[in-house]
Amino acid sequence: MKLGLITDIHEHVEHLRTALRHFKELEVDQIVVIGDVFELGYRIEETCRLLTEAGAVGVWGNHDYGLSFELDEATRAKYGDITMSFMTSLQPRLVIEGCHFSHVEPWLNPEDVADLWYFEGPPDEHGKLARIFDSVPQRLMLAGHYHKWLLVKPNGIQDWNGETPVSLADGRHFVVVGALCEGRYAILDTESSLLTPFRCE
């Protein structure tokens, strides 16, 4: 199965259109949003309409929390049906084809706003690595939030910068996908475990 991966859209409609067009050309089976659709709300309806039309599924991020979880009536009234329908479809976590998706590191609780905003830099020592790989049973874990590419194995951060495809076939991996608002997205082939990063031109 080909999964089109986008994270940290932040209402960047131009890059979103590019990624969605590319996914269609490459016959992606499912588009997965890994959080942070929202920015300031100026283009949220258009963003959600594009994602809805593309059949995207996903998880919420720290910027999405107020539109995806524990909504009050004032928030519901402020945004249109298209926005509300898509944003409330987002989940705290998703497992698709054996891959675990959450906006933040998988040991954090995405239903806790403090955990969603947690950031202490990349996991750089044994304890921080262990809590990632001990938190969920899936072999592949994918996140956003960092706005940069990151590839982690249980023995440490790998030498990879998102410029070339990488095989995730051997062992367990935690992968952070580069931010779409900066023109980055990816395709994961779950059969071959090949992750191919892309950049908007």
Image: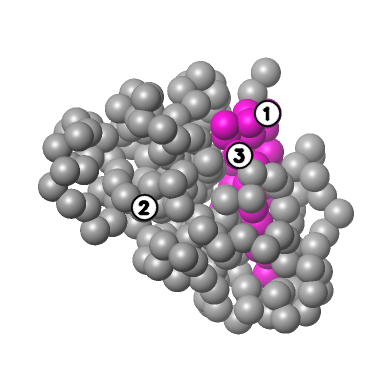
The vertical placement of 146 against 42, above or below, is below
197 over 100 or under it: above or below:
above
Q: Is residue 185 left or right of residue 44?
A: right
Give the residue pinned by disc 3: 179
Residue type (three-letter) at the residue carrying disc 2: Tyr
Disc number placed over residue 141 in the picture, else none: none
Q: Residue at x 32, y 50 (%)?
A: 66
Q: CA distance from mark 3 to mark 1?
A: 10 Å
In the image: residue 63, left or right of residue 161: left
**Is 167 situated above or below 84?**
below
Magenta stretch holds residue 173: yes
Crowd band around label 2 with a 10 angstrom C-alpha radius: few (<14), some (14–19), many (20+): many
Q: Which kind of residue does numbered mark 3 sit on? A: Ala
Q: Which residue is mark 2?
A: 65
Query: In percent of the image, x 20 and y 34: which residue is there?
Result: 78
Circle 3 Cα neighbour tier, 10 Å, few/some/many (<14 / 14–19 / ≥20) = many
Q: Nearer the viewer, residue 40 or 138?
A: 40
Instruction: Tell me which amino acid carries mark 1.
Output: Arg
Q: Earlier in the sequence, mark 3 or mark 1?
A: 3
Residue at (71% x, 47% y) in the render: 149
List the residue tagged with mark 1. 199
**Disc 3 vs disc 1: Cβ atoms closer than 8 Å?**
no
Residue drawn at x 71%, y 60% as measured from the top left: 121
Task: Check disc 1 and report its element: helix, strand or loop.
Answer: strand
Q: CA distance from mark 1 to mark 2?
A: 27 Å
Real-space Cα separation, disc 3 to disc 2, in angstroms: 18 Å
Numbered disc 3: secondary structure = loop
